Image (cartoon, rainbow, N blue to C red):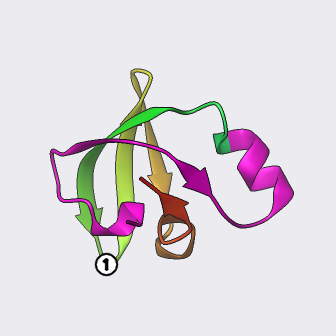
């Protein structure tokens, strides 16, 4: 299921990433994400003790 479908406070493991090659390279080493908040389709996640904002388009291409 896409990352955009995960609820706030839930933790998931990234299984596949679609999109541009440069984006996949940036995200390919990220294994476990926790959704902090969702606003207007955009997702803020906690990855390795850092918060990262992901746009709705990219969140729909990240499979967990």
Residue 63 in the image, given as x and y percentages of width and height? 48, 59
Residue at x 36%, y 67% (from the top left corner): 4
Residue at x 67%, y 64% (from the top left corner): 18
Whether residue 58 sits left or right of residue 23 in the image: it is left
45 is higher (above) or lower (below) than 5: above
Whether residue 4 sits left or right of residue 57 in the image: it is left
25 is higher (above) or lower (below) than 37: above
Q: Disc 1 marks which residue?
A: 40
Residue 15 in the image, given as x and y percentages of width and height? 51, 47
Residue 8 in the image, given as x and y percentages of width and height? 17, 54
Q: Secondary structure at mark 1?
A: loop
Question: Image quadrant of residue 49?
Answer: top left
38 is higher (above) or lower (below) than 46: below
Residue at x 46%, y 73% (from the top left corner): 56
Residue 62 in the image, given as x and y percentages of width and height? 52, 59
Report the number of numbered marks: 1
The stretch in magenta equals 1-26
Quarter of the image containing the N terminus? bottom left
State the residue in front, 14 or 40. Answer: 14
Question: Image quadrant of residue 27?
Answer: top right
Residue at x 37%, y 45% (from the top left corner): 45
| Extreme residue toward the top, this view | 49
Whether residue 24 sits left or right of residue 39 in the image: it is right
Q: Is residue 24 magenta?
A: yes
58 is higher (above) or lower (below) than 51: below
- Category of crowding for the residue at label 1, using alpha-carbon neighbours closer than 10 angstroms: few (below 14), some (14–19), many (at least 20): few
Q: Is residue 60 magenta?
A: no
State the residue in front, 9 or 39. Answer: 9
């Amino acid at each position: 299921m896409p990352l955009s479908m995960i609820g706030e406070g839930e933790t998931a493991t990234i299984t596949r990433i679609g999109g541009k090659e440069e984006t996949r390279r940036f995200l390919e080493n990220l294994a476990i994400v926790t959704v902090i908040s969702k606003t207007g389709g955009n997702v803020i996640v906690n990855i390795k003790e850092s918060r990262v904002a992901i746009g709705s388009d990219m969140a729909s291409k990240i499979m967990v």
